[in-house]
Image: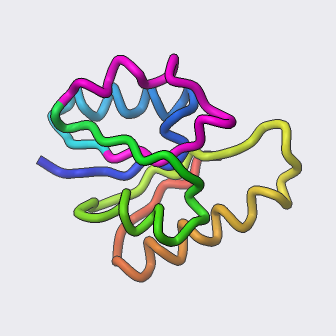
Amino acid sequence: METYLITGGAGFVGGHLAEYLLEKGHAVHCVGSLATGSLDSFGHLLSRPRFRFVEGRPDDREVLEDAGRGCCGIFHVAANPVAESEMNRPVTSAVLRFAAEHSMPVLVAS
């Protein structure tokens, strides 16, 4: 069983991706903000033993370290569609630095 980190786990895409990975037998750690996301996207997954949600922003190093512990890869789907792309740059940079430091592949989809 592999463990994957999903940034944007409180969003629509992140919640569905988490559900898919769990159904495939993987463990999932999600990091997301309830200020921009919703329990509606992933709340039904909270009772699953291989699912973990860490509330916070993925550009917060401590949040990334906590959520990313034990993960083998990252699905970076965190984005704020209302914000300009310049505002998402620090988040993506933080995720890419973390992935490089831990030799993890990352899929950037946002």
Q: Residue at x 61, y 64 (%)?
A: 59
Query: Please, is residue 98 above or below residue 19 in the view?
Result: below
Q: Where does the magenta region start and end?
A: 29-48
Camera-side residue of 58 and 74: 58
- Does residue 99 appear to the left or right of 82 in the view shown? left
Residue 16 forms part of the magenta stretch: no
Q: Residue at x 53, y 52 (%)?
A: 76
The quarter holding residue 88 reads bottom right
Residue 32 forms part of the magenta stretch: yes
- Does residue 22 appear to the left or right of 82 in the view shown? left
The quarter holding residue 108 reads bottom right
Query: Please, is residue 53 above or below residue 105 in the view?
Result: above
**Picture coordinates of residue 27, whole percent (x, y):** 21, 42
Q: Residue at x 60, y 46 (%)?
A: 78
**Picture coordinates of residue 61, whole percent (x, y):** 52, 71
Camera-side residue of 74 and 65: 65
- Does residue 110 appear to the left or right of 12 in the view shown? right
Q: How many marks?
A: 0
